[in-house]
Image (cartoon, rainbow, N blue to C red):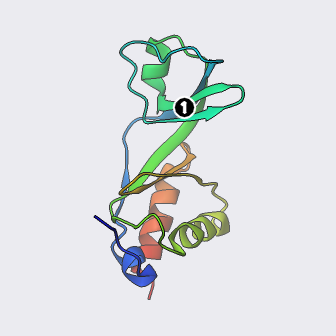
Amino acid sequence: MRGETDLARMLATMEPVLRPEEFGYGLIPGMAAIPAGLVPFATVREAEGLTVIAPCSALVRHGIAHRRGFACISLSVHSDLEALGLTAAFARALADAGLGANVIAGLHHDHILTSWDRREAALACLRALSRAP
C-alpha cells in the first residue's frame, strides 16, 4: 500500500512520537553476525562493518561499543517512499532550532535520531511544524 504524498497533509498528520529509551550507534566489524538476542532498531551495511542502531541498554548488554546520546522520534504518518518535501521540512525546522537530524526511512514511517539531551525541544519543534499553517 502506498502512503501519503501530499506535503501539507503529511505535515499536519505527522504526529511525532518520542521513544522513551536512549539510543546509540554501534559497529559490528567486518562480516560478523549480529549477536544472538540483539534486535536492532536499524542496521546499515558500510565498508567498515555493520552499523547497529539500538537502545543503549541493549548495546551494553551485548557488549557492543557504541556512541550514545540519541533520542528516536518516529513520525506516525504513513509517508510514501517517493513523497517529496517531508524530510526537507522537518530537517530545516530542526536545523533552525540548532538540532541535528539523522533520518531513517522505513517502509511506512520516518524516524529521526537527534540529541538525547535536547529531545523535548526536538519534539516541541516537530509538533509546532505540524501545527503551522
Q: Quadrant of residue 28?
A: top right
**Residue 68 position in % (x across, y down):** 58, 30
Q: Residue furthest left?
A: 1
Q: Is residue 91 above or below residue 12?
A: above
From the top left corner, tell me how far across and down residue 61 is, in percent: 44, 13
Q: Which quarter of the rendered picture does the N terminus lie within?
A: bottom left
Say which amino acid is labelled 1.
Gly
Name of the residue lying farthest toward the right:
47
Q: Secondary structure at mark 1?
A: strand
Q: Residue at x 49, y 20 (%)?
A: 59
Residue 10: x %, y % from top left: 39, 75
Query: Would you identify the image quadrant in which residue 79 lies?
Result: bottom left
- The crowd level at tag 1 (other Cα within 10 Å; few <14, some 14-19, many 20+) is many
Q: State the quadrant of the C terminus.
A: bottom left
Q: Considering only vertical position in the picture, is 73 above or below 126?
A: above
Image coordinates for residue 93, horizontal then vertical, percent: 59, 70
Name which residue lies at 63% across and 57% down: 99
Relative depth, front residue between 100 and 120: 100
- Dot 1 corresponds to which residue? 24
View extreme (bottom): residue: 133
Rendered residue at 66%/18% (across/down): 30
Question: Number of marks in the image?
Answer: 1
* Point 42% across, 51% down: residue: 106
Say if 91 sits above or below 116 in the image. below
